Image (cartoon, helix red, strand yellow):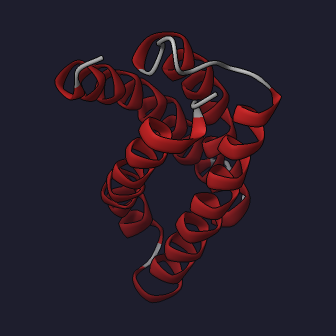
Amino acid sequence: MSLTRQSRHYLAIGLLQWLVDWGVVVGLTHVGLPVASANVAGRISGALLGYWLNGKLTFAGDDTTIGVTQFQRFMLMWITTTLISTWAMTQIDDVFGLRWVWLAKPAIELALGAVGFVLSRYWIYKR
């Protein structure tokens, strides 16, 4: 499976995940939910969709699978990146305010997505 093909699929699925995630964060914070809680809810909504789509499309191959071990690896990565994302978002909220949170979230998630691609390709979905 080529790196180019995987990159394209990961990016397309990531955009879909990001739209779901960002929409949930903006919607929930708009109605008054704290940034940290809204961020976790947004990341959960995108994560489950992305785990399944990336396992079935992006990283599908003879040496990969979707199973308990792969889901555990995914959850370890997801929890770590969610903690980093939530910490960054709350720091931005404290210093700059909610509007900057909405603007900064895409950049934060893009950086974490690059880390996620490498981990997914070489570790998460491997048998």
**Furthest-bottom residue in this view:** 95
**Furthest-left residue in this view:** 4
Is the residue 127 above or below the residue 28 in the image?
A: above
Q: Which residue corresponds to the image point at 35% horizontal and 27% vertical from the top-left? A: 10
Is the residue 38 above or below the residue 9 in the image?
A: below
Q: Nearer the viewer, residue 84 or 93?
A: 84
Q: Nearer the viewer, residue 54 or 17?
A: 54
The picture places residue 112, in percent across and down from the top left corner, at 42, 56
Is the residue 86 above or below the residue 72 in the image?
A: below
Quadrant of residue 16 within the rendered picture: top left
Q: Which residue corresponds to the image point at 61% horizontal and 44% vertical from the top-left? A: 43
Q: Quadrant of the C terminus?
A: top right
The picture places residue 64, in percent across and down from the top left corner, at 56, 21
Q: Quadrant of the N terminus?
A: top left
Does any portion of residue 34 appear in the rendered image? no
The picture places residue 117, in percent across and down from the top left corner, at 39, 42
